[in-house]
């Protein structure tokens, strides 16, 4: 079993739709949870990050972490064609005996105008 | 501007010809790392470095070498490239001071080994 599982998609939605992207993980030691957006032929860029369980909102984006279920989500409201990209979840733990940062395989999102 | 730079951006080479991909960051980050990205496999870590002169293997280190002689630079060396090393490579850096480990990526190097 992979430490981080992410549905690769592709996910196609109409403009204006609410998008839900998800990852599950198996290592309860992870402390930081991140979402990266990667446009074609570009490097991943950090979109949002959270520490511990709960929600974090930034404009149209909401990141949600449920550590008890080992499940993280990224919601995109009022999706736009410019949101079309691959979204990668990542999680990390640093310090002590464990230093690890792991990525999901990415979900390809297409927002149709 | 805070950034991670990589060179070259594109490289086509032949099997067995040694090459180096350079990586440099101007954010004084302790942590640097190399990833390769392949379709269906996502980002896989090759090597990482927690600080100067401290390097460690990631998930797919075979066929690669790294060095960290200076804080800002972390070159990736392929001593004898093979076609299975054809991939998109990313360098990344991160601050390690308990304020959230946020990884910043370079623009990528697309390597083709013939």
Image (cartoon, coloured by chain):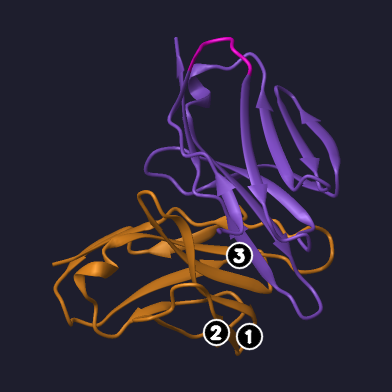
* Residue at image mark 2: B68
- Tell me which residue sits at (47%, 57%) in the image: B43
- Tell me which residue sits at (73%, 60%) in the image: B101
Left or right: B35 with respect to B9?
A: right
Left or right: A47 with respect to B99?
A: left
Letter of the purple chain? A
Q: Residues within 10 Å of mark 2 (few under 14, many from 20)?
A: some
* Residue at image mark 1: B52
Dot 3 or dot 2: first in sequence order is 2
Residue A113: x %, y % from top left: 44, 9
Dot 1 or dot 2: first in sequence order is 1
User: Rounded to the nearest whole Å, what is the CA distance between mark 1 and mark 2?
Assistant: 5 Å
User: Rounded to the nearest whole Å, what is the CA distance between mark 3 and mark 1?
Assistant: 13 Å
Residue B46: x %, y % from top left: 47, 72
Residue B7 in the magenta stretch? The answer is: no
User: Are the residues tagged 1 and 2 within 8 Å (C-beta)?
Assistant: yes
Q: Identify the image quadrant of residue B28.
A: bottom right
Magenta stretch, overall SS: loop
């Amino acid at each position: 079993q992979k430490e981080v599982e992410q549905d690769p998609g592709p996910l196609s939605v109409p403009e204006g739709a609410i998008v839900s992207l998800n990852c599950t993980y198996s290592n309860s030691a992870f402390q930081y949870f991140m979402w990266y957006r990667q446009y074609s032929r570009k490097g991943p860029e950090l979109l949002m990050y959270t520490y511990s369980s709960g929600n974090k909102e930034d404009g149209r984006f909401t990141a949600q972490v449920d550590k008890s279920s080992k499940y993280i989500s990224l919601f995109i409201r009022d999706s736009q064609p410019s949101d079309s990209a691959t979204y990668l979840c990542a999680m990390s733990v640093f310090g002590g005996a464990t230093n690890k940062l792991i990525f999901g395989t990415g979900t390809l999102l297409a927002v149709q105008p | 501007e805070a950034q991670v730079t990589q060179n070259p951006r594109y490289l086509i080479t032949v099997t067995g010809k040694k090459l180096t991909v350079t990586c440099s960051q101007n954010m004084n980050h302790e942590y640097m790392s190399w990833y390769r990205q392949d379709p269906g496999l996502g980002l896989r870590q090759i090597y990482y470095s927690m600080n100067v002169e401290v390097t460690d293997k990631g998930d797919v280190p075979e066929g690669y070498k790294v060095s960290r002689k200076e804080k800002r630079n972390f070159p990736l060396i392929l001593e004898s490239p093979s076609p299975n090393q054809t991939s998109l490579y990313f360098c990344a850096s991160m601050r390690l001071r308990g304020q959230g480990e946020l990884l910043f990526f370079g623009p990528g190097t697309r390597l083709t080994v013939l």
